[in-house]
């Protein structure tokens, strides 16, 4: 069953703007991960944040985690056309990786 | 970095036939492999978890006799879709987790079209 839900489902922004995607989940987690998927391709791991962490950075990516609200956000700063993709959060619990519904991000050049 | 290879990337088969998809971890030993199914513009749905040398654990609603999973070695898992039907047409993705760490690496996926 789907663990998390993401919003928005789709997001279109101008190149150079920041993109924020949110993820909510339902059960306790060990960690939360964000993945990127280009259309019709496999998934690329972006960043992992552990349940005892609140914020993590990697290049233009910033992830926050609020375990009290069971939510996470992914911020992509200074977006580029190449950032166009679907982004999924995934939670690890009971040794399984369960994906959210995903956000389709379109960067308009 | 770690690489997971899936083969074939695309396959077309006739209704009623069986098709096998392979998932290989190329530079690490994968004690656990996961198989997902993804319909267009939807998220990934976990089908089953396979551990090397043991039977796969299937998610609720996934027919184990239809989707046969074998994880015979630490670098190879296979998914066989038996008696395929057009509704089995989908994007199938495998992932693998090594003996250490939390990172799970994904294959590039396999497009299955049943005609």
Image (spheres, coloured by chain):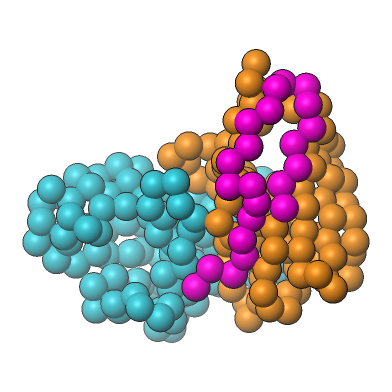
Membership of A7 in magenta stretch:
yes
Residue B48 picture quarter: bottom left
Spot the orange chain and give its letter.
Answer: A
Q: Is residue B101 left or right of residue B8?
A: right
Residue B22: give x, y in percent of width and height: 36, 56
Where residue A58 sits in the image (x, y, percent)? 84, 43
A48 or B69: nearer the viewer: A48
Q: Is residue B36 magenta?
A: no
Image height of B45 relative to A102, above or below: below
Which stretch appears magenta? A1-22
Q: Residue A37, located in which quarter of the rendered image?
A: top right
Q: For the point 78% across and 26% down, which residue is it?
A: A17
| Count of numbered circles in the view | 0
Residue appearing at x 43%, y 40% in the figure: A40
Residue A94 quadrant:
bottom right
Q: Position of residue A26 (x, y in %)?
A: 67, 74
- Residue A85 visible, this angle: yes
Q: Residue at x 84, y 45 (%)?
A: A62
Q: Is residue A102 above or below residue B71?
A: above
Task: Note the chain letter of the cyan one.
Answer: B
Q: Is residue A81 left or right of residue B13?
A: right
Q: Is residue A47 in view?
A: no
Given residues B102 and A67, the one toward you in this image is A67
| Residue lying at the far top of the rendered structure | A109
Q: Give the side of residue B68 with respect to residue B45, left or right.
A: left
**Residue drawn 29% across the image and 70% down it:** B67
Image location (x, y in percent) of residue A41: 47, 41
């Amino acid at each position: 069953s789907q663990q998390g839900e993401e919003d928005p489902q789709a997001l279109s922004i101008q190149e150079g703007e920041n993109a924020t995607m949110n993820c909510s989940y339902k059960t306790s987690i060990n960690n939360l991960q964000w993945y990127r998927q280009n259309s019709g391709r496999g998934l690329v791991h972006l960043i992992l944040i552990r349940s005892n962490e609140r914020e993590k950075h990697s290049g233009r990516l910033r992830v926050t985690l609020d375990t009290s609200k069971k939510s996470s956000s992914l911020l992509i700063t200074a977006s580029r056309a190449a950032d166009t993709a679907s982004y999924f959060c995934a939670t690890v619990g009971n040794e399984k990786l369960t994906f959210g519904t995903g956000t389709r991000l379109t960067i308009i050049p | 970095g770690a690489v997971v290879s899936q083969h074939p990337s695309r396959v077309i088969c006739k209704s009623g036939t069986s098709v096998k998809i392979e998932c290989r971890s190329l530079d690490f030993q994968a004690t656990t492999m996961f198989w997902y199914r993804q319909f267009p513009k939807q998220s990934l749905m976990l089908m089953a978890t396979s551990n090397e040398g043991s039977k796969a654990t299937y998610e609720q609603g996934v027919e184990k006799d239809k989707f046969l999973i074998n994880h015979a070695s630490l670098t190879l898992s296979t998914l066989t879709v038996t008696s395929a039907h057009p509704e089995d047409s989908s994007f199938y993705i495998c992932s693998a987790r090594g003996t250490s760490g939390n990172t799970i690496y994904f294959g590039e996926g396999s497009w299955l079209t049943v005609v």
